[in-house]
Amino acid sequence: MREKLTPYLSKLSHKSGISKQYSHNIKEKNFGHFNDPLMEDAHEMVKGLVHKYKNRALIKVSYLCAAHCRFCTRIRQIGNPKGTLQKVDIENIVCYLKEHPEIEDVILSGGDPFLTPKITESLLKNINKIDSVKVIRIGTRLPLQSPESFERNSIGQLLDTINRISIEKPFYILLHVEHPDELTSEAITSLKLIKQKTATILLSQTVFLKGINIDFDTLYSLFTKLYFSGITPYYIYHCDSVNGLEQFVGNIEEEKEIMRRLRDTLSGIAYPTFVADLENEYGKYPFDLEIIKTTANSVIKNTNIFVLDK
Ligand code: SF4
């Protein structure tokens, strides 16, 4: 994956929480892990549509992103123009969804669906006509990589379409964010625009990344900033074992300890679930943090928990 930054990110490259996410590192080597640990390629039923779990489908709108994150799980594909959906691909996806009414929850990802607003808009308009699809989600990093893009007409039109759909059915925007340095005033403004123009629910996803965010203060600041901006922290992942990502994979016990401290200090809504995306078909599983140990000296009564013996 070649190095790619937006002009906006270049201006912010003095901030370590941003530059470390995008700069190519000599340590980026192949250590014999997986290229596709989430087995997406094996479950790609028609071009762009991954059907791995019974009631959910992932749709990769393109492999294009405004900037290339060195920790991307899809490092094998990002930047390849061949991944971009064409009209015929959208028709095939719509056919597959109609033939599989058990798919009720559709997630648009990629690549970044906001980077190709016309294709995403066309796809959404077609999916919205399928009654069996009850929930739509879009994953994005564009508000953090190129917030000024949200002033463009094409994205304005996409937001209008999203608004019409989000009034009818639940529509989630999943912001992929790693560090509080990313939540600049410009980024917050673009996120506020999404909230003003649509009836979507904004959630965040984060990955524990060695050298970037594996410390309590950084994550406390990140989740507090998100919460105060009206974005609910949803998941924090242990970094996937993907070829080329080894430099970012942290120690699980250290990550668990940070999560326990965050549990003690953050508001409940600001506290995300710590999960691993398992290298099989089971999907995301939460870690057992053993926060409460029920021992002979612990009393759990009504909604009050008294841990007498820590
Ligand atoms: S924006 Fe998302 S899909 Fe694109 S390179 Fe970054 S993590 Fe990967």
Image (spheres, rainbow, N blue to C red):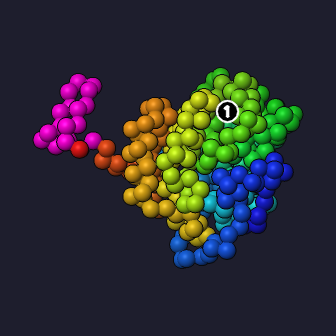
- Residue in view at x 43 percent, y 36 percent: 265
In-front residue for pair 205/180: 180
- Residue 295 is a magenta residue: yes
Direction right: furthest residue = 153
In-front residue for pair 201/193: 193
> How many circles with numbers are drawn on the protein?
1
In-front residue for pair 153/185: 185
Q: Quadrant of residue 113?
A: top right
| Amino acid on which disc 1 is placed | Asn
Q: Position of residue 120 (x, y in %)?
A: 75, 42
Q: Is residue 301 left or right of residue 231?
A: left
The residue identified by callout 1 is 128
Q: Position of residue 177 (x, y in %)?
A: 62, 46
Q: Could you tell me if residue 104 is visible in this image? A: no
Magenta highlight range: 292-309
- Residue in view at x 31 percent, y 44 percent: 291
- Residue in view at x 74 percent, y 25 percent: 197
Q: Could you tell me if residue 249 is visible in this image? A: yes
SS at circle 1:
helix
Q: Dot 1: within a 10 Å radius of its alpha carbon, few (fewer than 14), some, or many (20 or more) residues?
A: many
